Image: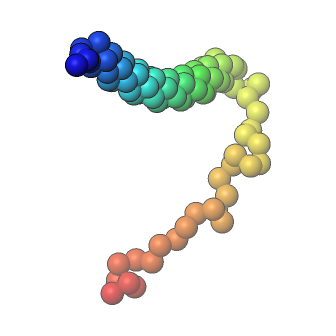
């Protein structure tokens, strides 16, 4: 009769190692998602900083040096959507 104590013990180690591997893979995925989230936030804040700096710079310029905004940034009436009034919808 042969004892299989060492083989059963090895199987337990392999099972535990697989659990650790699964846990590590899950942690990697979670941290990658968090990194993508933080990268998006960093990009948003960089754009916000640039916009605020431009506004401050514009506010500090003398009025005579201010130039009108480019044509594409000006208000264009055709870009406004006119919704029908409530009485016209009824």
Q: Position of residue 11 (x, y in %)?
A: 31, 21
Q: Is residue 60 left or right of residue 29?
A: right
Front-lying residue, 24 or 12: 12
- Give residue 88's quadrant in the image: bottom left
Whether residue 66 is visible: yes
Q: Determine which quarter of the picture holds residue 69.
A: top right
Give x and y (percent) for residue 21.
40, 22
Q: Relative to 30, is 3 on the left or the right?
A: left
Is residue 67 positioned above or below 71 on the image?
Answer: above
> What is the x, y in percent for residue 26?
39, 27
Q: Residue at x 61, y 19 (%)?
A: 53
Q: Please tell me in which quadrant of the rendered image residue 55 appears.
A: top right
Of residues 89 and 68, the one nearer the viewer is: 89
Judge whether 20 appears above or below 47 on screen.
above
User: Going 54% across and 24% down the picture, which residue do you hit?
Assistant: 39
Count of numbered tags: 0
Which of 72 and 16 lies nearest the eye of the viewer?
A: 16
Residue 27 visible: no
């Amino acid at each position: 009769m042969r004892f299989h104590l060492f083989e059963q013990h090895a199987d337990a180690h392999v099972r535990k190692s697989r659990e650790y591997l699964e846990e590590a893979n899950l942690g990697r995925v979670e941290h990658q998602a968090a990194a993508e989230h933080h990268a998006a936030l960093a990009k948003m804040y960089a754009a916000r900083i640039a916009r605020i700096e431009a506004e401050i710079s514009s506010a500090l310029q003398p009025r005579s040096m201010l130039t009108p905004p480019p044509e594409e940034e000006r208000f264009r009436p055709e870009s406004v959507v006119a919704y029908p009034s409530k009485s016209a919808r009824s």
